[in-house]
Amino acid sequence: MRIELNGQSKELDGPSTVAELLLALGLERAPCAVEVNAQLVRKALHPSHALAEGDRVEVVTLVGGG
Amino acid sequence: MRLPKATASRSLPLLEAADAEYLMTTHQPPIIARTSPIAPALPPLRIGSFTLKSRLVVGTGKYRDYPTMQAAIEASGADCVTVAVRRERLVDAEGRSILDFLPLERLTILPNTAGCFTADDAVRVSRLGREILEQLGNPGAGWVKLEVLGDRTTLLPDPVGTLEACKELVKDGFTVLCYSSDDPIIAARLRDAGAASVMPAGSPIGSGRGIANPAAIRMVIDRLKLAEQGGSAEYPVIVDAGVGTASDIVHAMELGADGVLLNTGIAHAQDPVRMAHAMRLALDAGWHTARAGRIPRKLYANASSPWEGVITHIPGE
């Protein structure tokens, strides 16, 4: 299954939830937020939110800024 | 030939005269007769349900390294810092996070929507920032510094997009601090839309040009804070962006601002930590100056030593 992750195409091995994706990225404990198709997916819903072919996923964090 | 009036009076310092007019004819902030010693600490800054000890809010971008940023924040005395929301770096996820260098237990994080050019994007980014701060248990989850920018060259606010996003975010329960143009009309519209604070730009972000249009900033402050203009003295106005040096902060505070937000002026100074210290002192200086009642500007001198008893020859007398 192919998704777009932070603007880059990414092939996933099989069906995956947001929580599984974060685990695969090593970000399961990182302070980050996830959007799927421009909609926020709250952390509590990460384990149940299944990703679909072609989903546009953004994983964001806080950085220095003014 | 008779000269037009403006030309005839060109020998006067016109700018100074204009400056004097708006600085002297407005009434804000009120000068209150002081009966007790000056308190060492300024009163806290209240923005919606948030209370900040320091009236200086600092950015966290553009520092050469995180330890310098950490030391500069400490030296600034700020208890609120703003951060941006960006893509997680998936290639180098091992890199250290800015959060490791921010004492989250004593700082309120103010997430911003820097880099947003539409209301929709600003709302998305605000929600993402809130999601992260909720995970961190930081009170900053409740608010946002809203920026909807017009273009990348000026980074000036898009007033239409800002107003649209402000309404949406207020509806969604955010305490919204709106980065705005130095225009009293849009400032009042943002306030009416529920912005907890309006933050007029002194000059473009990162430009270091200070308060480019002091008369406009004064009008924004008067509009939002003077009862006779439909404002409230309690309504917080923070000058945001353009601060290049400490005197810019003094200027903003003298014009009646409640606080100042800046980033580049500290982060890109040659010695950011010392500059942060200077900015802190400037804020205090400006606050007290605004309440001490400055002398009117005059074109000619007014001797400080008495004329009575002089033993000298005064030219022309």
Image (cartoon, rainbow, N blue to C red):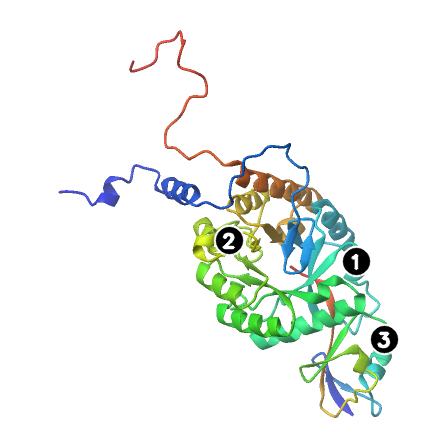
Query: 10 Å neighbourhood of mark 3: few (<14), some, or many (≥20)?
Result: some
Q: Is residue B212 left or right of residue B146?
A: left
Q: Secondary structure at mark 3?
A: loop
Q: Residue at x 64, y 44 (%)?
A: B279
Gap between marks 3 and 1 measured at Cα: 20 Å
Q: Which residue is mark 2?
A: B225
Residue reaching furthest top? B311
Disc marking residue B104: 1
Whether B108 is drawn above or below A40: the answer is above
Whether B223 is drawn above or below B152: the answer is above
Disc number lying in front (3 or 1): 1
Q: Position of residue A60 (x, y in %)?
A: 73, 73
Disc marking residue B92: none
Gap between marks 1 and 2 measured at Cα: 32 Å
Q: Secondary structure at mark 1?
A: loop
Q: Is residue B163 left or right of residue B100?
A: left
Q: Which residue is mark 3?
A: A28
**What's the amino acid at mark 2?**
Lys
Q: Chain of mark 1?
A: B
**What's the amino acid at mark 1?**
Leu
Q: Position of residue B115 (x, y in %)?
A: 61, 68
